[in-house]
Amino acid sequence: MDVSFALLGRASLLVALVALGPPLVLLGAATPFLVRGATRDGRVGRAAGLVSGTATLGSLVGTWLPVHVLVPAIGSAWTCAVAGGAVGAAGLVCWLGARPRTKGGAAALGLAGLAIVGLGVAAERGVGRPVGEGTEVLAELETRYQYARVEREGDRTILRLNEGLDSFHSLTVDGELLTGAYFDQYGLFLPREAPDGRVDVAVLGHAAGTIARQLLALDPERRVHVTGVELDPRVAELGARHFGLPADDDRLDVVTGQDARVYLDRTDRTFDLIVVDTYVDQVYVPFQTCSVEFFASARDRLAPGGVLTANLSGFTVRDAPVAAIRDTAARVFGEVALLRVAGGRNFVLVAARDAAPPDPRARTHPAPLASLAEAAARPGAWLVFEDAPGNHVLTDDRSDIEKLADADLLEKSRRQLEGAR
C-alpha cells in the first residue's frame, strides 16, 4: 500500500514538473527581461514600475474579461486560443520593438498572432471530449459556471456537468416516471396532507428538473407546487428541452442565478418539503449547504411538521462525508435518518421540524413508489441517528468537507489496490 501510493505520488510530481516546469521558468524570467528592455538612460526604477503597473492592469483585465465576457460569449476553447494569441502577439511586439523596423514587421506580427490562435483551436478540436461507445451528444455548452453536456444512451437522457465519469445531475428514461437512481426516493416523503390543501416543495439544486418533474407527476390532484433553485440559468433551460420538464405548468417556478444557500437565507417563504441536491464536481458538497447554519436556516423555512431531505453520496454510513453531514444535521434537528438507496451508492438524509423523521415504511405511497417502499423496509435500509456530544459538526467558519471527501476517495483507492493484489 505505502509503496503504491509513494510511486503514484512520485509519478504525479514528475508529470507536474515536466508539464509545468518550463512554462513557470519562462514566466519567472519574463519580468527581468522586460525591465531590461524597458530601461532607458539607466532609469531602472521607472522601467520596473512601468512593467509592474502594466502587469497589474493586465491581471485585472485577464481576470475579468474571460469570466464575464469571453467564456460566456465564445466558450473556453476559443478563450484559451485568444489568450494564447494575445500572449504570443505581445511577445512579438516586444521582439519587433527591439529590432530595426521593417515594412513587413506589422504584417508578420498579425500573421503570427492569427497562427497562434488557429493552432490553439485546431489542437482543442483535435483532442475532442470523450464519450462512451453508443453515446450520442444531444447538447454541449459552456456556461458562465461550468461545462454541460446532455447525452443519450439507449433510452436514457443524461445531464453531466464538469465531468465525464459515471455521475450525473439529471436523468430521464423514456416512458418511465422513475429513473432507477436516487432521484426517485423523494416522492416517499412528499406530504399527503396540507392544512390549506397545497404542498409547497423547494428543490435546491434543480439542475434540469428531474426531481421537480417526478414530484409534479406524482400529484394527480395538482396540490404540489415546486420551486426549483438553480444557480446556472442555461442548465435550467435544458429541462424543458431535453428532460421532459413541463415548463408551462403553473405549479412550477424555477429560480435561477441564485446559490441555494443565498435563496434559503433570503426567502421568507415556508415549505412542506425541502430537497437538497447540491453536489458539484462529482463528489463534493459545497460547504455552505452542509453546515449547522445551513440546516438551521432550512429548519426555519420548514412549515410545522415539514420535512428536509438531502442527497448524500457514499457506500456506507461510516463514509466520512456522510457521517459528518449526518451529525451536523442531527445537531440542528436532534434526530435524523438515513435511507439507503437500493442498488446505488447514495443515501437520503431525512429530518423533520419539531418531529421525528417520517418513516417511509409506515406510510402508504402511490403505486409507482411501491417498490421503493419495499426496499426501504429491508434490514439496514432505514437508520436513525441522534445528536451526541463529540460528533463531527461542520460550520460556516470551520468546514473540512472537501478534505473529508478527498480522504474518503484515497481510502477507497487504497482498499481497491489491496484487493487487486
Image: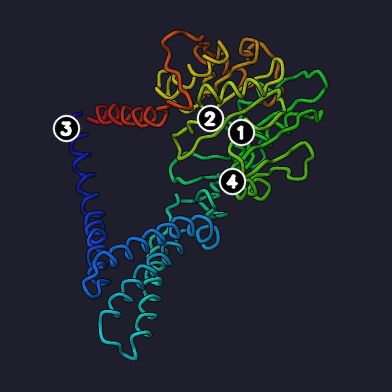
Circle 1/circle 2 CB separation < 8 Å: yes
Task: Give the residue pinned by disc 1.
Answer: 204
Q: Is residue 280 above or below residue 384?
A: below
Circle 3/circle 1 CB separation < 8 Å: no
Mark 4 vs mark 3, CA separation in Å:
43 Å
Going from N to C along the chain, the mark reached first, 1 or 2, is 1
Q: Nearer the viewer, mark 4 or mark 3?
A: 4
Circle 4/circle 3 CB separation < 8 Å: no
Q: Nearer the viewer, mark 3 or mark 1?
A: 1
Mark 1 vs mark 2, CA separation in Å:
9 Å
Label 1 packing within 10 angstroms: few (<14), some (14-19), many (20+): many
Q: Is residue 420 above or below residue 194?
A: below
Q: Which amino acid type corresponds to the residue marked 3 in the rendered image?
A: Val
Mark 3 vs mark 2, CA separation in Å:
37 Å
Going from N to C along the chain, the mark reached first, 4 or 3, is 3
Task: Give the residue pinned by disc 2.
Answer: 289
| Position of residue 3 in the picture relative to residue 236 (left or right) | left
Q: Which amino acid type corresponds to the residue marked 2 in the rendered image?
A: Thr
* Secondary element at tag 3: helix
Going from N to C along the chain, the mark reached first, 3 or 1, is 3
| Position of residue 90 in the picture relative to residue 100 (left or right) | right
Mark 2 vs mark 4, CA separation in Å:
16 Å
Task: Give the residue pinned by disc 3.
Answer: 3
Task: Give the residue pinned by disc 4.
Answer: 232
Q: Which amino acid type corresponds to the residue marked 1 in the rendered image?
A: Leu
Question: What is the x, y in percent for residue 398?
Answer: 42, 25
Mark 3 vs mark 1, CA separation in Å:
43 Å
Label 3 packing within 10 angstroms: few (<14), some (14-19), many (20+): few
Q: Quadrant of the C terminus?
A: top left
Going from N to C along the chain, the mark reached first, 1 or 4, is 1
Question: What is the x, y in percent for residue 133?
Answer: 45, 51
